[in-house]
Structures are given as structure tokens and as C-alpha cells.
Image: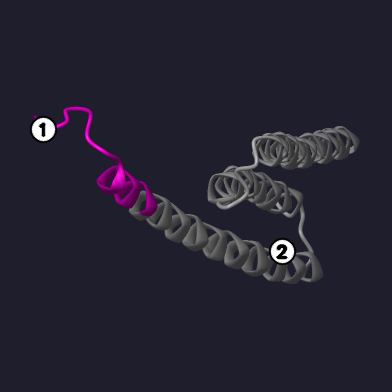
Amino acid sequence: MEETYSIESLIVEAVQWLKLGIETTGALIVALGVVLAIVQFGRAIASKQTHNFTAIRLVLARYLALALEFQLGADILSTAVAPSWEQIGKLGAIAVIRTGLNYFLSLEMRQERATASHEHAIQQKAAPSADPEV
């Protein structure tokens, strides 16, 4: 019986370390996305192309969406080992909130991509052709 308890406690501890690793990965993904967005923002400011920040927002949104998936995975993992009803309730609330955030973030990314594609098509039509008529 004591051996079973020891194995169970090792599994619980291993899951907690795994959860910490996944949460850390999610946080690092957010940090990376923020750094990349700041760099792109700085380039846009430096080149005085501040009229359209759609590309910068899309970069950040992609990283945030990915990080949300990691964070949700970590939350699910934390309740995988001997969950209480309170933990399950918290997981349900967190899952609903994070899934909602991810849904609206994905929706916004689709809209931003459509807007960027539309603006690109307009720019292509407005650009003078390379072969002028003689």
C-alpha cells in the first residue's frame, strides 16, 4: 500500500512539473510575440508607415492564440490527477473564458486578413502597370 502511495505521489509531482513547463512555454510564446510585434512597430514608426498596423496586430494575435492553447492545456493537465469538484468547476470557467478569447481572437484575425487582402488588391489595381502603352 505504501508503494502505491509513493508511485501516486510521484505521478502527481511529475504532472505538476509538466504543468509548470507548459505554462512557462505559454508565457514565453506571449513574450516572443510581444517582442516581435514591438520590433515590427518600431520599424513601422522608423519608416513612417504608421497608416496600417494590421500586419503587426496579426503577428501578435497569432502568438496570443497559440499561448492560449498552451495555457488551456496546462489547466486541463492540472485537473487530470485526482481533481476535486472545485478544481473541475474552476477548469470549466477557465476553459470557457480562454476558448471564448481564442474564438474572438481568431475571428478578428480572419477579419484582419480579409481587410489586408482587400487593401492589397486595391493597391495592386491602383499601381501603374510596368508596360506603358506606346
Left or right, 69 with reference to 113: right
Q: Position of residue 66 (x, y in %)?
A: 60, 44
Residue situated furthest left in the rendering? 134
Residue drawn at x 62%, y 64% as measured from the top left: 101
Q: Is residue 52 magenta?
A: no
Residue numbers of the magenta segment: 119-134
Using the image as rendered, state which of residue 132 and residue 73 is in the foreground.
Answer: 132
| Mark seen at residue 121 | none
Check whether the beta carbons of the residues at disc 1 and disc 2 lie within 8 A of each other: no
- Residue 133: mark in rendering: 1
Badge 1: few (under 14), some or many (20 or more) residues near its Cα, within 10 Å?
few
- The kind of secondary structure element at disc 1 is loop
Q: In the displayed structure, does residue 28 sit left or right of residue 73?
A: right
Using the image as rendered, state which of residue 49 and residue 100 is in the foreground: 49
Label of residue 91 in the image: 2
Which three-letter amino acid code belongs to the residue tagged 2?
A: Leu
Q: Nearer the viewer, mark 1 or mark 2?
A: 1
